[in-house]
Image: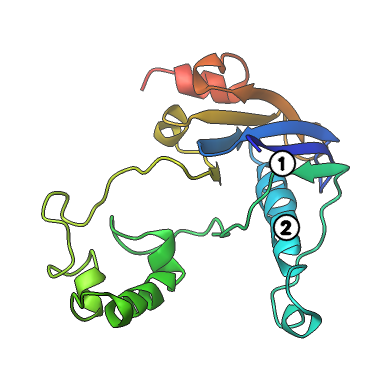
Amino acid sequence: MAHISIRGARTNNLQAIDVDIPRNRLVVIVGVSGSGKSSLVFDTIAAEAGHQVNETFPPFARNRLPQWTRPDVEAIGGLSPVVVIDQRRIGGNARSTVGTITDAWTYLRLLFSRLSDPHVGESNAFSFNDAAGMCSTCAGLGEVEHGHTAVIVEHHLDVIRRADWVVDLGPGPGRHGGRVLYEGPVAGLNTGPTAQALLAPE
């Protein structure tokens, strides 16, 4: 499926919105404070994806997993398992990734070091924070890889400008928000508060 398709989303202040979010792109959800950004990303998309993943486990395992409340939505499709990172500021450095923040990378490095054939070395040989495993060209900072979907709530204008796709919610906060004002490439965003902020001289 080429899109994450959401129909009739009414979670929190969302006003029965319909939106198609392209897969394998950087998608930025924008809008004024209280317009429904977190309701769409965390309480609708992530909640349904988490619920669907939990349903694949037997009841014994399911009872020990985080519980996800089903969102108030008519239909949602095209989801895959998600990694949810909340909106609090994350410490770390330029080499911090989803894998390092969730500690998944620690276990992957250990697995690679034990099972690699031929044996390459201990787990630090797979660490981009260690000279033994760091790429000498990029010093462990990496490259942008295509082929993954990232849906983020964002207020930083430089990130919004680099997005492949934008969903702008609004027009206001609370009951005055929760509507899709625009969805599409960032170049087509030309009305509303987000467009004004992007066009304002720096």
Residue 5 position, x and y percent, is 73, 37
Above or below for 62 versus 71: below
Q: Quadrant of residue 15?
A: top right
Give x and y (percent) for residue 85.
Answer: 54, 59
Q: SS of the residue at dot 2?
A: helix
Mark 1 nearby-residue class (10 Å; few <14, some 14–19, many ≥20): many
Image point 82% across, 47% down: which residue? Answer: 11
Name the foreground residue: 81 vs 88.
81
> Residue 92 location, x and y as percent?
33, 64
**Can the viewer see residue 177 in this picture?**
no
Q: Is residue 139 visible?
A: yes
Describe residue 115's horizontal placement relative to residue 188 as left or right. Answer: left
Name the one closer to the observer, 196 or 126: 126
Tag nearer the camera, 1 or 2: 2
Give the residue displayed 73% in from the left and 69% down from the top: 54
Residue at image location 69% in from the left, 43% down from the top: 78
Spatial CA distance of label 1 from label 2 is 15 Å
Q: Is residue 62 left or right of residue 115?
A: right
Q: Residue furthest bottom?
A: 60
**Nearer-the-camera pick, 77 or 151:** 77
Q: Which residue is mark 2?
A: 47
Q: Is residue 96 left or right of residue 10?
A: left
Name which quarter of the figure residue 31 lies in: top right
Q: Which quadrant, please, contains the C terminus?
A: top left
**Residue 158 versus residue 122 in the image, above or below:** above
Residue at the spot 50% in from the left edge and 36% down from the top edge = 25
Amino acid found under the numbered disc labelled 1: Gly
Pointers 1 and 2 in contact (CB under 8 A)?
Answer: no
Quickly name the residue at label 1: 36
